[in-house]
Image: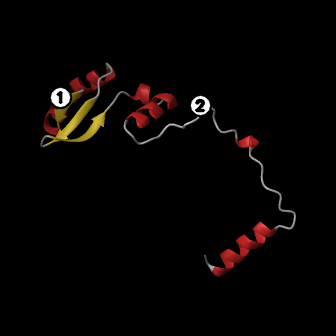
Amino acid sequence: MTRAPISDLKARLSRYLDMVRAGEDIIVTDRGKPIARITPIGDHLQIEGRLEMLARTGQLRPPLREEALDIGRLERPADPEGRARLLLLEERAEGR
């Protein structure tokens, strides 16, 4: 990963963009502190690659089970009298 101060990035933008096209990440710095990252767009548009990056950086925790949740298998509990609806309407009327 290459570090580039803002002034150098402005002066040599084409050179840095060529490096990004070649697959390299560029860390942009301001007075020595990282403020941005320029990365190749191809890999990060793929969902799997994005999820892996988020998990690596601690922004996402992968599921404990391998199988995906099948929303179609979830069933709504029976409520023939419509009590859940009435309770919800009461809460809304009370402003809770």
Nearest the eye: 71 or 1: 71
Residue in the picture at 59% in, 35% down: 65
Q: How many marks?
A: 2
Q: Is residue 19 above or below residue 63?
A: above
Colouring mode (rainbow / by chain / secondary structure / one colour): secondary structure
* Image quadrant in which the C terminus is located: bottom right
Image coordinates for residue 27, horizontal then vertical, percent: 24, 34
Report the amino acid beneath label 2.
Glu
Report the amino acid beneath label 1.
Arg
Q: Is residue 57 above or below residue 2?
A: below
Residue that numbered label 2 is attached to: 66
Image coordinates for residue 70, horizontal then vertical, percent: 69, 38
Residue 95 is left or right of residue 79, and the answer is left
Name the residue furthest front.
64
Image coordinates for residue 69, horizontal then vertical, percent: 65, 39
Residue in the picture at 68% in, 79% down: 93
Question: Crowdedness of circle 1 by 10 Å Cα count: few (<14), some, many (20+)?
Answer: few
Name the residue furthest right.
80
Residue that numbered label 1 is attached to: 12
Q: Which tag is nearer the camera, tag 2 or tag 1?
A: 2
Residue 93 is left or right of residue 12, and the answer is right
Nearest the eye: 19 or 70: 70
Q: Is residue 29 above or below residue 39?
A: below
